[in-house]
Amino acid sequence: MKLSFRNLLLGSRRIPSRTEYKFAMLRMQVALLLLVVSLFYVVFDYFNGLIEFLPWYGLMAGVAILSMVLNRRQHTHAASIIILITINIMIFLFADVDRPVGGVYFYFIASSVTGLVLFGKEDHLSLRLFFGLLPIALGIAARLWDFNIVPLPSRDESVSQITFLANYVIGLFTTFMVVQFLISRNRESEQSLITSEQAISKASEALRRSEARYALALQGTRAGIYEWYLRENRVEVSDHWRSLLGYSPSEMLHVTLETFLTMVHPEDAARTSASVMNHVKNQLPYQNEVRLKTKDGTYRWFQDSGIGKTDESGELRVVIGSIIDIHERKMTEEQVRLQNELLEKANQELDYFVYSVSHDLRAPLSSIQGLTSIFAMAKDSREKDEIVKMISDRANVLDEFIREVLDYSRNSRLDLKLHPFLLWEVVDEVLAGLSHMEGFKVIDIRVEVPSDLTIITDRERLKVVLSNLLTNAIKYRDWGKKSYVTIRASTQEGMWVIDVEDNGIGIRPEHLPRVFEMFYKAHDRSTGTGLGLYIANESVRRLKGTITVQSVYAEGSVFSVRIPMPATLQEV
């Protein structure tokens, strides 16, 4: 009986393979289903007084019969194309007028699945894609635009509900039938896969070659790989990940997220934690530049990149990432940033400097020119002597200004020259150079510098700093009391500390924040250019040190210079 049923559907001709037999049976089942659906709707619409679709149902039935005839005669390709084209056209026409109310759209799913299966062979790839995607395109078109090729029938609510249920059941049944066919084919394929050991062996060899290429690629990029398993809070790291941080393969065998975060630089900790939490929450790829502590305690810059992998429930299961050493690049970027800041600062200072220099150079020159004219008209010798003294004072002011400009130029232009020297010798040289200043001899100058204190720094720059500080201390002494200047020196926590203390007129509190600015003058008594403390501050900065001031108006001031010792000297 089974053979008779087979011959009835497919004819008595021999079918070459079981695969072709299976597909022929599926094709015949689809055609029979189309014929049954057509007859069902002919009867259903007729009894409900709907005659608009009857010709189309007749066409569907005719195509179903034609497809069965072609299939029996083994014109399988033509049978599949005819029935699929007819199905897609009919569904589109009915969906265009039906909208989602009648459930016609369920057939688009069945049609797409059927098209993918009927052209399941590799040589039918283009047809499989075409008939698999065609229902999707037609469904979208029917939903978005009104073509009204078939007139819209009038139905009551009960008919629409029955139509929807019928379409729902038939559409899902067709899909179920095709899926069941695929399951059956899959079971048959399992047996053939068991005998494909040679193909599997070749695939394994290809996989091994791929893994070798992957390892070479990782070695070329010098990336350290890690896998973070969230549920276990366990991080598996590669040997190269360890080596990038200075560890051997036998060290850091147990790594957790907390372990990693303790290695992050404190300034990067908040940003890195936020990046990790954001990745866990949103499951997006991440990339973060971070400083990590190496085994020797130093920090290096790394680029940390990764992506998460979810399980079947969509929960993030593992994060796979890598770190790449970018320390040299970051150091270069930082150096460029600092150079740009210095250049911007230099440009701003240059504009201000040119303006102020032109003014401060012209002022004493104009005074000298005026005094020279007065001198030519003077007849009294005492008057001439007074004019000469005034000209000399103006020339001294000009000379001091030019000397400060030269100090400023040398500090910004010349490289550091670090040499060891005894500090008291430099102090003695500076005091000797200032001995001609007015008021020098009336000030009690106290030098409290150890005779054996050796400093390693730029000698000439330090002389400029001390000269400016001592010049101010002498110039702004308090004439109403016995003046003194104390120079002290000591070593404190890897720093050389030099203090210059005086009991002069002091500085008002509102001027203290600006005393180190270029051309700033904090006193009405000031006869200088306002460059001295600025040059002192810039010179100390070139020595990588700091200079601070504490002052009480009418009581005195203390300027403190701190210069760092070389690292090797601190270790001694």
Image (spheres, rainbow, N blue to C red):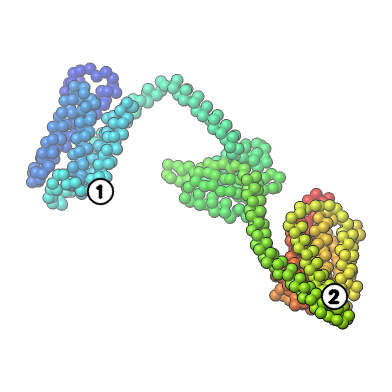
- Image coords of residue 174 (percent x, y): 24, 36
Secondary structure, mark 2, is helix
Residue 169 seen in render: no
Q: CA distance from mark 1 to mark 2?
A: 102 Å
426 or 233: nearer the viewer: 426
- Image coords of residue 242 (percent x, y): 64, 40
Q: Which quadrant of the structure image shows residue 551?
A: bottom right
Looking at numbered disc 2 in the image, what kind of residue is underneath it?
Val
The residue identified by callout 1 is 144
Q: Nearer the viewer, mark 1 or mark 2?
A: 2
Q: Where residue 388 is drawn, which disc sits there?
A: 2
Report the side of 566 relative to 171 (left or right). right
Report the side of 31 relative to 213 (left or right). left
Secondary structure, mark 1, is helix
Rendered residue at 68%/41% (across/down):
246
Q: Which quadrant of the structure image shows residue 410?
A: bottom right
